[in-house]
Image (cartoon, rainbow, N blue to C red):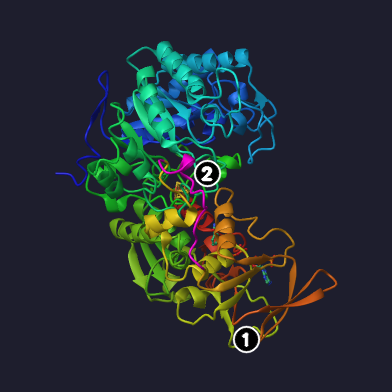
């Protein structure tokens, strides 16, 4: 008897059957562009072997003008087809099924040759697209169909036609981007013509016994987006035109509403998919911020959808389905929706990986194979670096002892988990806890490791982390000054008016903690939707509240400062920084760059500007909080060196600058894989 009867139930598509209701959603890894198809094949095959019901690849362009960026992968030649065969063969050998996503980026294509229904530039691209003429439209449709036929030739079980997220097909559907007056614009019937023609021609090109998924934008979250009537009409027409399955798309890339970030509640948009249930007779898939089998099972059991799509959770743990099926759900490495190693990498042209699972995308080079010789390994520090090192070393067969001075594991993760919108870090700490137990790591909590205690081990790993940097501001020893550590630990009262010294990741986190103190909109869907102004698309086009969002008033009055003259928050995550900045702006947080810190007194923080230190200004504050970065904690490493004991230093103890959990976990895993 399984805990997930709906999730693990097969899905009969008539001409073929899927073994369960889990779609591994499309995720561009950038491996597609490396030309290393063996590596891409291994990436998908591991996920197929562990039970994903149907995999959808990252977006493959139907032609060069439609590539997300110049040089984006396409399926243009016989050689491309043969290369993709490597992938489909590997997935089939592993017992899985795989569909190829066809993605035409339209005006989001990052290059001067981009095309769109109308020559309207997107706010997130510098390029004005060329307006397609009649022949150009025919070419785009023909290229979709040809690509689908080639996908079949390459051995795929299906294709997904990407019709959402503001890409070309979506651009035809709404007046926001389609101002045409010919038969491809104007009435909805005309605006639907392009998407439907694509579907008809794709279906004709691949025959009846081939999966064709249509990813339909069910809530655009942009002005002048689709109405709900239009969404339903499109879905019905798509079914008639040949779609086997309708998948959910949520929000355009240019939307200023978060849709997948960690601060978005779990399954925040499943209610949109549920509205479509019963309107079509083909299966409907739901998507976005579903990261564990319990949530997925509940959605299916309660009739939100026929199938559940998860993309990033399959980076975090290829064995998601297998572990769920074997009653080992607690061992599933959780996707915390941080985007740090996946989407942030994708948009920086790097290989997508995962903060929680550094093997993702590196399956052919980072393996946790059993060690030749069982060693005794001491790990000092149970923050993310030490925890990952301990687990990987133990999994490889070593006898691992983990020393932690605190009474609990987690290190800096225990601070992150206190920030509203970062509740997913709870799950990460819980996962580490389970894995320490499963791999048999000997935990010594509340124990400060000494040089003597470490002298007998074969390997010593120092992961002692970081301590706050002393910014040396005159007056910082006053009673109105706190470190971020005190604030996040919740053991010191904070006044109403707050000045924060340092606008890095932690300065932003502390500001969010204070403006929302005691509130957790990420755990309350209704509250979160109201904050961001998301409404039922039946009430307003695109699901955008015409009155805008309704953020709760800030609990504290916060000013965030930095010395650099650049825009505060510029160095935050590529795909999430804007959310942090917008969240704080909407809560009235003032952000000031280019300051010199002159002194702190009972009135607040005194600053000046520029090299000449002019414009002396008082930032009135009841409390000043120091978030000025960190330095490595290397006392133990230095003592070991002095005693001549060989050791490895990882995480923040190694390099504190620009430390984050991604680097810490990656370094821990990579070191432990070599011991
Ligand atoms: P950080 O990002 O390096 O920021 C340190 C801040 O302190 C900067 O604003 C810096 O700005 C300021 N600063 C540096 N030296 C100073 C000095 N001597 N006096 C006064 N101010 C000084 O470090 P963090 O905020 O402590 O975060 C630590 C790491 O965790 C970072 O790598 C961060 O990316 C990561 N993190 C990420 C997130 C996220 O949302 N992704 C959240 C939390 C933490 P100026 O030098 O311009 O004054
Ligand atoms: Fe999820 Fe973060 Fe991993 Fe991306 S990097 S898959 S968001 S945990």
Residue 251 percent location from the top left of the image: 49, 41
- What is the spatial separation of the Cα atoms under label 1 and label 2, in whole angstroms? 41 Å
Residue at image mark 1: 477
Q: Earlier in the sequence, mark 1 or mark 2?
A: 2
Q: Indicate the secondary structure of the residue bearing disc 1.
A: loop
Q: Is residue 524 above or below residue 145?
A: below
Is ligand 2 within 8 Å of the beta carbon of the residue shown at mark 2? yes
Other-residue count near label 2 (Cα within 10 Å), few / some / many at <14 / 14–19 / ≥20: many
In the image, residue 526 lies in the stretch drawn in magenta: no
Q: Indicate the secondary structure of the residue bearing disc 2.
A: helix
- Dominant secondary structure (helix, strand or loop) of the stretch shown in magenta: loop
The residue under the point 18% across, 44% down is: 2
| Residue nearest the viewer, comparing 139 with 396 | 139
Q: In the rendered image, is residue 380 in sight?
A: yes
The residue under the point 46% across, 47% down is: 260
Residue at image mark 2: 343
Residue 60 percent location from the top left of the image: 51, 26
Q: Is residue 208 above or below residue 294?
A: above
- Marking on residue 202: none
| Residue nearest the viewer, comparing 135 with 610 | 135
Residues in magenta? 538-553
Residue 190 percent location from the top left of the image: 51, 21
Residue 125 percent location from the top left of the image: 65, 38
| Residue nearest the viewer, comparing 587 with 146 | 587
Q: Is residue 115 above or below residue 525?
A: above
| Residue nearest the viewer, comparing 563 with 165 | 165
The residue under the point 59% across, 49% down is: 574
The residue under the point 61% across, 28% down is: 179
Q: Is residue 280 left or right of residue 521?
A: left
């Amino acid at each position: 008897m399984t805990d997930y009867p709906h999730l693990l139930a097969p899905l009969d598509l008539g001409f073929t059957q899927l073994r369960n209701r889990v779609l591994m959603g499309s995720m561009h890894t950038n491996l597609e562009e490396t030309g290393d198809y063996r590596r891409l094949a291994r990436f998908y095959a591991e996920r197929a072997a562990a039970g994903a019901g149907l995999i959808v690849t990252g977006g493959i362009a139907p032609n060069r003008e439609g590539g997300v960026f110049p040089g984006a992968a396409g399926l243009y030649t016989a050689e491309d087809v043969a290369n993709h065969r490597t992938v489909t063969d590997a997935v089939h050998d592993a017992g899985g099924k795989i569909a190829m996503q066809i993605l035409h980026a339209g005006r989001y294509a990052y290059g001067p040759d981009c095309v769109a229904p109308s020559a309207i530039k997107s706010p997130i691209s510098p390029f004005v697209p060329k307006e397609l003429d009649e022949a150009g439209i025919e070419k785009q449709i023909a290229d979709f169909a040809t690509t689908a036929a080639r996908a079949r030739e390459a051995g795929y079980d299906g294709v997904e036609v990407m019709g959402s997220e503001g890409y070309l097909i979506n651009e035809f559907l709404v007046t926001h981007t389609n101002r045409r007056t010919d038969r491809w614009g104007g009435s909805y019937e005309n605006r639907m013509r392009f998407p439907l023609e694509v579907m008809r021609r794709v279906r004709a090109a691949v025959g009846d016994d081939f999966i064709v998924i249509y990813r339909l934008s069910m809530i655009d979250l942009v002005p002048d987006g689709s109405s709900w009537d239009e969404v339903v009409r499109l879905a019905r027409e798509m079914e008639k035109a040949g779609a086997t399955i309708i998948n959910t798309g949520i929000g355009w890339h240019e939307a200023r509403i978060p849709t997948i970030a960690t601060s978005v509640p779990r399954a925040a948009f499943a209610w949109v998919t549920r509205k479509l249930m019963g309107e079509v007779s083909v299966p409907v898939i739901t998507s976005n911020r579903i990261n564990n089998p319990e949530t997925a099972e509940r959605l299916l059991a309660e009739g939100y959808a026929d199938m559940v799509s998860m993309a990033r959770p399959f980076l975090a743990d290829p064995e998601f389905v297998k572990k769920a099926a074997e009653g080992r759900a607690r061992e599933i490495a959780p996707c915390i929706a941080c985007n740090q190693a996946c989407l942030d990498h994708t948009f920086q042209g790097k290989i997508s990986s995962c903060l929680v699972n550094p093997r993702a995308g590196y399956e052919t080079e980072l393996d946790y194979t059993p060690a030749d010789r069982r060693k005794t390994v001491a790990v000092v520090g149970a923050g993310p670096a030490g925890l990952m090192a301990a687990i990987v070393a133990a999994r490889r067969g070593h006898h691992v002892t983990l020393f932690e001075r605190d009474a609990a594991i987690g290190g800096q993760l225990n601070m992150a988990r206190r920030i509203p919108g970062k509740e997913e870090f709870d799950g990460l700490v819980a996962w580490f806890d389970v894995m320490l137990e499963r791999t048999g790591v000997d935990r010594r909590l509340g124990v400060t490791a000494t040089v003597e205690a470490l002298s007998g081990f074969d390997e010593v790993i120092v992961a002692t982390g970081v301590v706050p940097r002393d910014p040396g501001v005159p007056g910082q020893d006053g009673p109105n000054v706190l470190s971020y550590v005190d604030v996040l630990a919740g053991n010191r009262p904070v006044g109403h008016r707050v000045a924060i010294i340092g606008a890095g990741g932690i300065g932003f986190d502390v500001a969010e903690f204070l403006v929302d103190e005691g509130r957790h909109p990420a755990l309350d869907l209704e509250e979160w939707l109201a904050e961001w102004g998301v409404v039922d698309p039946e009430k307003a086009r695109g699901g955008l509240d015409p009155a805008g969002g309704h953020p709760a008033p800030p609990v504290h009055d916060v000013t965030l400062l930095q010395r650099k003259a650049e825009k505060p928050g510029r160095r935050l995550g590529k795909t999430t920084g804007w959310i942090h900045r917008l969240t704080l702006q909407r809560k009235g947080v003032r952000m000031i760059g280019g300051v010199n810190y002159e002194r702190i007194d009972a009135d607040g923080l005194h600053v000046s500007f520029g090299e000449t230190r002019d414009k002396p200004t008082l930032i009135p504050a009841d409390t000043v909080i120091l978030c000025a970065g960190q330095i490595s904690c290397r006392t133990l490493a230095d003592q070991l060196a002095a005693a001549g004991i060989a050791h490895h230093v990882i995480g923040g103890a190694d390099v504190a600058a620009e430390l984050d959990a991604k680097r810490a976990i990656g370094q821990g895993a990579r070191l432990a894989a070599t011991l």
